[in-house]
Amino acid sequence: MVSARRPGRLLIALAGACAGLQLLQLCFVPGPQVAPSPSTDAAQFNPTVAASAVLPALTMLADDAEAKYGDYRRWSSVLVPLSTLVFPAVGFGAFTLYLFSEDFAFQLIPGSKEGQRRAALWDANPRTAQENPMDGLIN
């Protein structure tokens, strides 16, 4: 028995060939008679374009990013004492001064000046001025 050829295959091949020809048109540059007229925007100065044109030239001025022999001595002689002596001394000194001030842990010291001042601020607010904190709660 001979199978009958289906006409759908021919239509699919024909549609594929037409799509390929349409895509082939996009591969070529149009002729001079079809070219669009030049716009006037290109004649205007654009600072973004100027900056992007200068950036490659600026990279030529920079030195190569390499570690030179004498650089580590210069930076280590500054950063090691700064990070191990100066910064901790300033930080611990500031904490020690705060530790012995009246503002340190005022929540834990009853009758401290800062605690009384903040309690007076809370009492001056009409929404928080309550004699009994359980007022208004269902109990």
Image (tube, grey):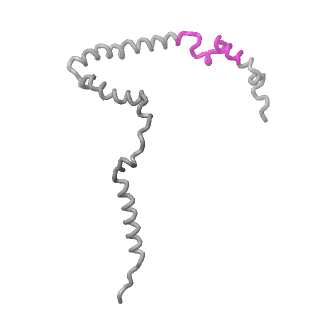
**What's drawn in magenta, residue-wise?**
98-121
130 or 24: nearer the eye?
24
Looking at this rendering, what residue extends furthest in the bottom direction?
A: 1
Q: Residue furthest left?
A: 69
Figure quadrant of the C terminus: top right
Q: Residue at x 67, y 16 (%)?
A: 118
Q: Is residue 43 magenta?
A: no
Residue at screen point 33% across, 16% down: 79
- Up-down: is 118 above or below 132? above
Q: Is residue 102 magenta?
A: yes
Towards the viewer: 71 or 35: 35
In this view of the protein, can residue 43 be seen by the observer? yes
Q: Is residue 73 left or right of residue 48?
A: left
Vertical order, 64 against 91 (above or below): below
| Spot occupied by residue 54 in the image (x, y as percentages of width and height) | 33, 26
Image x and y of residue 102, in percent: 59, 10
Q: Is residue 82 above or below residue 134?
A: above
Residue pictured at 29% horizontal, 16% vertical:
75
Q: Quadrant of residue 24?
A: bottom left
Residue drawn at the location 37% of the way across and 85% of the way down = 3
Residue 113 at x, y = what percent? 65, 10
Q: Is residue 139 visible?
A: no
Seen in the image, is 135 located left or right of residue 68?
right
Whether residue 129 sits left or right of residue 61 in the image: it is right
What x and y, as percent, mark residue 37?
42, 42
Position of the N terminus, as image quadrant, is bottom left
Tell me how many marks there are: 0
Q: In the shown orientation, is residue 57 left or right of residue 134?
A: left
